[in-house]
Image (cartoon, grey):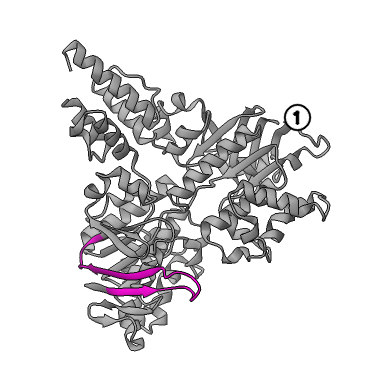
């Protein structure tokens, strides 16, 4: 499913004393099957963008259009949004009730709900038989996060938006989210991942959109976006350490590719530079 | 000094204990980082340090005072302050100033002294211009600085922080870190800093790694990061530069192992 934003402005408290423009003149197309990371400093408009893409907000002006939805009459029903800190919104008496909620709202038959819930729990790596009757409130932070994601996956969204899904998780949890995001994308879903972790975005996404003050500052493959150190710094963002090292070495006269923005990419560039230097005898 | 001796703690009888015979001494003036995977007991240990949680067995002594003695709880909390992860869960009043004063009023401290301590906390945390603002209209970083101001107004020796930047974005994180660095340097405050963010561990003089409710490693940050394989085994994030340095060292450039910062690794690379 493809999403197109044209000339989108979004203004909070329009006309009021605390009027704030969260997004200004945003033009953006995300094609079917893309895996996009959206990064930006707090207040740059990331979460507003997520809410607009999910159809929960109407833009103050401009249009947000979805094409290719399996439910053309209600295209936004094919969008799933995992809110920031979704575990703050848990309410179900049991994990089953919690996860079933969205599917029930969509009109899934009561008999069929257990099948859908079971599938969704398996997708997020939770054992349905262990979890089924447990209160979501009794789970660990990481398990709660998974239950919330299952509650979105149960609706089988074609476009899934995750708003800082790794915030507050430990390394294991963050790795798991990164794998999940890749898998959802490989299954053919369009994925929009909002994060402020540059290293994560560099490792996982194929396209990175940087927001600053409600506008799109940079948009391109991670290799390109993360080599724009000065522009990123202007948005109070720092490229991942591996990318900064590569830039620093360039500044010191090394002839290496600035597009190496991941650990592996940087290691390969540095090793091949060291090897060639040795052969040439001028290292 | 805070002395933790053979500390045991479990949340329920059915589940395995979270703290399982933990020993630790924290000297005044230190910046101690506490790391370990989710469930290793970090947050539980932090809550035992000022008597929010009481030991099931073993003991926690704060400058000789036992947290298990009820009469000692207030004196202990005048020395050990606590800052939680989510600032929204700990701000209570309608203005920044009142919020900082809240805990002091509860302790029944005389009006004048409250005013003095609030002024000092506002100034140390550079919040004087925000004194009349309602906390809920502040940014996340400002809220967390208000929480820290409230904590240090209460207690002047030890500050325990449980992942205080986990919910903040990078710029706000720097704001909070800068304030803490200043507090530590200028006021000599002892900082006990629970974190999952390995870059923040570099701020500490000493780091303890918890595993299954015990201290598995007690060393300097540089020592901890010199062994990426061990960190991964412990479910911890390896700072990208340490990881990259290790990866290059494994490929034959041994002099790079253990580099922690971008400049340091660049320096060492240029010396090859």
Q: Which chain does tag 1 point to?
A: A
Q: Residue at x 40, y 55 (%)?
A: B37
Q: Is residue A9 magenta?
A: no
In the rendered image, the residue lying farthest to the front is A129
- The magenta-colored residue range is B5-31
In this view, the residue in front, B155 or A222, is: A222
**Where A271 falls versus B265 (above or below)?**
above
* Residue A232 sits in quarter: top left
Q: On screen, B196 above or below A60? A: below
Quarter placement of the N terminus of chain A: top right
Q: Residue B228: percent from the left, percent from the top?
A: 30, 43
Q: Outermost residue toward the bottom?
A: B71
Across and down, in percent, residue A139 comes to 56, 63
The answer to which image quadrant residue A248 occupies is top left
Total numbered labels placed on residues in the image: 1
Residue at 19% x, 16% y is A278
Q: How many other residues sit within 10 Å of disc 1, few (<14), some (14-19) or many (≥20)?
A: few
Circle 1 residue: A68
Query: Which one is in front, A25 or A282?
Result: A282
- Which quadrant: the C terminus of chain A? top left
Q: Is residue A201 above or below residue A116?
A: above
Q: Is residue A79 left or right of residue B109?
A: right
């Amino acid at each position: 499913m493809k999403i197109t934003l044209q000339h989108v402005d979004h203004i909070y408290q329009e006309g009021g004393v605390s009027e704030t423009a969260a997004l200004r003149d945003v033009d953006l197309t995300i094609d079917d099957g893309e895996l996009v990371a959206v990064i930006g400093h707090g207040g740059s408009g990331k979460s507003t963008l997520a809410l607009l893409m999910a159809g929960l907000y109407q833009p103050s002006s401009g249009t947000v259009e979805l094409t290719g939805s399996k439910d053309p009459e209600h295209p936004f029903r094919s969008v799933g949004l995992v809110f920031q800190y979704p575990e703050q919104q848990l309410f179900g008496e049991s994990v089953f009730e919690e996860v079933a909620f969205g599917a029930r709202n969509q009109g899934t038959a009561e008999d069929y709900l257990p099948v859908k819930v079971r599938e969704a729990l398996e997708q997020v790596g939770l054992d349905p038989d262990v979890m089924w009757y447990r209160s979501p409130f009794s789970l660990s932070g990481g398990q709660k996060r998974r239950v919330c994601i299952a509650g979105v996956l149960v609706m089988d969204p074609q476009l899934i938006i995750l708003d800082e899904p790794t915030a507050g998780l430990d390394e294991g949890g963050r790795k798991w989210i990164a794998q999940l995001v890749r898998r959802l994308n490989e299954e053919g879903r369009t994925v929009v991942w909002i994060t402020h972790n540059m290293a994560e975005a560099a490792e996982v996404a194929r396209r990175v959109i940087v927001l600053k003050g409600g506008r799109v500052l940079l948009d391109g493959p991670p290799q390109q976006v993360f080599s724009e150190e000065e522009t990123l710094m202007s948005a109070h963002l720092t490229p991942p350490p591996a990318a900064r090292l590569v830039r620093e070495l360039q500044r010191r006269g090394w002839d290496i590719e600035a597009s190496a923005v991941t650990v592996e990419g940087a290691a390969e560039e540095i090793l091949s530079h060291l090897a060639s230097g040795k052969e040439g005898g001028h290292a | 000094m805070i002395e933790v001796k053979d500390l045991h703690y479990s949340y329920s009888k059915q589940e395995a204990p979270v703290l399982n015979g933990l020993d630790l001494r924290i000297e005044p003036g230190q910046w101690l980082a506490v790391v370990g995977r989710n469930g290793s007991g970090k947050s539980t240990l932090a809550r035992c340090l000022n008597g929010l949680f009481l030991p099931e067995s073993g003991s926690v002594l704060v400058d000789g005072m036992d947290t298990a003695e009820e009469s000692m709880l207030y004196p202990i909390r005048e020395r050990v302050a606590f800052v939680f992860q989510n600032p929204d869960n700990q701000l209570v009043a309608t203005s920044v100033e009142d919020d900082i004063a809240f805990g002091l009023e509860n302790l029944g401290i005389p009006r004048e002294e409250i005013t003095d301590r609030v002024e000092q906390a506002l100034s140390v945390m550079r919040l004087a211009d925000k004194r009349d603002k309602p906390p809920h209209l502040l940014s996340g970083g400002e809220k967390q600085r208000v929480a820290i101001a409230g904590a240090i107004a209460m207690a002047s020796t030890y500050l325990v922080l449980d992942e205080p930047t986990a919910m903040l974005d990078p710029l706000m994180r720097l704001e909070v870190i800068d304030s803490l660095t200043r507090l530590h340097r200028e006021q000599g405050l002892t900082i006990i800093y629970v974190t999952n963010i390995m870059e923040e561990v570099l701020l500490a003089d000493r780091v303890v790694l918890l595993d299954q409710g015990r201290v598995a490693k007690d060393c300097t940050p540089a020592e901890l990061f010199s062994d990426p394989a061990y960190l991964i085994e412990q479910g911890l994030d390896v700072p990208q530069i340490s990881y990259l340095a290790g990866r290059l060292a494994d490929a034959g450039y041994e002099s790079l192992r253990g580099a922690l910062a971008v400049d340091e690794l660049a320096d060492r690379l240029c010396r090859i």
